[in-house]
Amino acid sequence: MSQADDALTIAASVRAGTELAAAVLARSLQRIRSLDRSLRCFLDLDEGSARARAEAVDRDPDRRGGPLAGVPVAWQDNLAVATERLSAASRVLEGYRSPFSATVLTRTAAAGGVLLGRTNMDEFGMGSSTETSAHGPTHNPFAHDRVPGGGNGGGAAAVAADLCPLAVGCDTGGSLRQPAALCGVTGLKPTYGRVSRHGLVAVASSLDCVGAIARRAADLATWLDAVAGVDPADPTSRPSPGPVAPTLPQRHDLRGLRLGLPWQLNGPGLDDEVAAGTQRAIDHLRDLGATLRGASLPSVVHALPACYLLAAAEAASNLARYDGVRFGRRREALGRPDAMTSETRGQGFGDAVQLRLLLGAFATATSSGDDWYRGAENAHHSLRADLRRTFADCDLLACPASPIPAFPLGSRRDDPLAMFVCDALTVPASLAGLPAISLPCGATAGGLPIGLQLIAPADREDLLLQVAHVFQQHSDHHLQRPLP
Amino acid sequence: MIDPVAIDRKSLLHLAELVQLRLGGERENVLHRRLQDILDAFASLRTVPPIPDPAPANTLALRDDCPEPPMAVAAALANAPRQSSHCFEVPRIPPP
């Protein structure tokens, strides 16, 4: 990969026959060999399998003519690819290989994408730094002593370092948007249900959304059109309201756009440089024609604890399947069968996962936990009502994607509450199931990227990506690369 | 003022049993402390009142839940690494 390679440029050249998918992949692999020893984005990359997939694209006229023709695509280690390893960055799935492929990746490949390899993540996506991975942390390409964000830090860092132009992953509470912000790339969480989750390792089923990270919003629009829509294997998937990518050229400025600025997400607790960088981006959107409007989401104060409590409750149920019998690793233990399961889970899950399982059990299976769970549900309803009211006066909402820039490795690892705060600005859209995007919008004095988040009403990915595209047509923040 | 909820060691081990985790040693102490910290920090959740007219749980317009014929046995077993008698075959579970 050269630094000029973005997804749509690659696809255009492969479709035109000026380049082979195999040649594109070879550049990507060369760059991974050169840089990933220090970044650690990819897990057990199988170059032979990736080459075979690229050659298959070159032999297939349908895929060679597809919207993602020849684009190397990384996938988060919680998405299944037939016969490939799948661990969700956990020891509990050590040695497991999936017998089938996730629908989103099957569709990505059918559109011409070349499945490259799986990327590192926080264990079961539980973290905001990729430090809870059983495989060790990924490093931020802009500062190797800092985190890339999480859960999908591997995918964000891979795109930022130009190891690949597109990384597919899951956003539960911000796992695509927050690492995209910390790594200076663009991350999209679609509306809940717009992209199939068949083949995704379930953690918090009412929140999990499959999305992607790329250099530009236009790349993500093309990818979304290729994968969105009903999947019979996922009962929560829904019909797509229509293609997005063809609508991007329709908008050249932001005249007529009402941009809401919830004060609760644009002031308290923000790093000074993040606040200033985001404000400059919002001013730029205004200069492009948007009308700025004050907004208020009073219930957002409870969004973070509500999101974590509900996610933990759902995780406690979803992760019950890792019992030493059905998947992956087993630890033998003397005595009754349940001793084997407890031993397997006690040794297989890391601290971050165990903590959430305990919290989930507290919330769902104890009398005193009822108050917490009921309060979380009330907060959930209140937030949705606040957002519904706000979107009556605004077309999109804007705020930072992360309250802080990339922080030093190890500085928050042993403090779950400090780690939770990293997702304070991304969980509202997650709780409400709304589409949201993180866009690079500047950097700190030390060169660390800052991300602007835009949130849209349900199913308005067209508007979300149009505005993001206009912003990127009139700025170059998304083109900034880490120093070699 | 919200009454604090203290998780004692017996309660912690009960939670661990519910989610089938064997705790022990220093890790048990660390998880105990962190769980208590989270419950203290999240305590305000207990005071969030219900809103008068909450929207239905699924404001996201999920598609209709239409009854369909159940999956055929062969399709259900299609991804089983091993199978016998119309069932998944799994590693032997140690006898009690």
Image: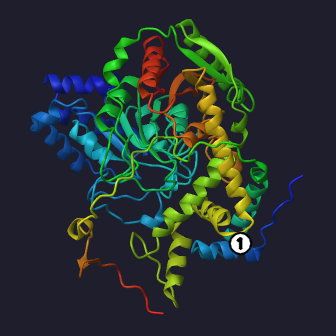
Q: Residues within 10 Å of mark 1 (few under 14, many from 20)?
A: many
Query: Residue A1's x, y, as percent?
Result: 31, 30
Q: Nearer the viewer, residue A191 or A328?
A: A191
Camera-side residue: B55 or A286? B55
Query: Which residue is most to the right?
Result: B1
Chain ID of residue with mark 1: B
Residue in view at x 76 percent, y 74 percent: B9
Residue at 55% across / 77% down in the picture? A342
* Residue appearing at x 46%, y 67% in the figure: A92
Residue topped by disc 1: B12
| Residue A129 drawn above or below residue A480 | below
In the visual, does B11 lie left or right of A391?
A: right
At mark 1, the secondary structure is helix
Give amino acid for label 1: Leu
Measured from the top left, where is residue A475 in percent x and y? Answer: 48, 13
Which percent across, then down, holds residue A364? Answer: 64, 64
Q: Residue at x 40, y 52 (%)?
A: A77
**On screen, residue A114 above or below A281:** below
**Can residue A412 be seen?**
no
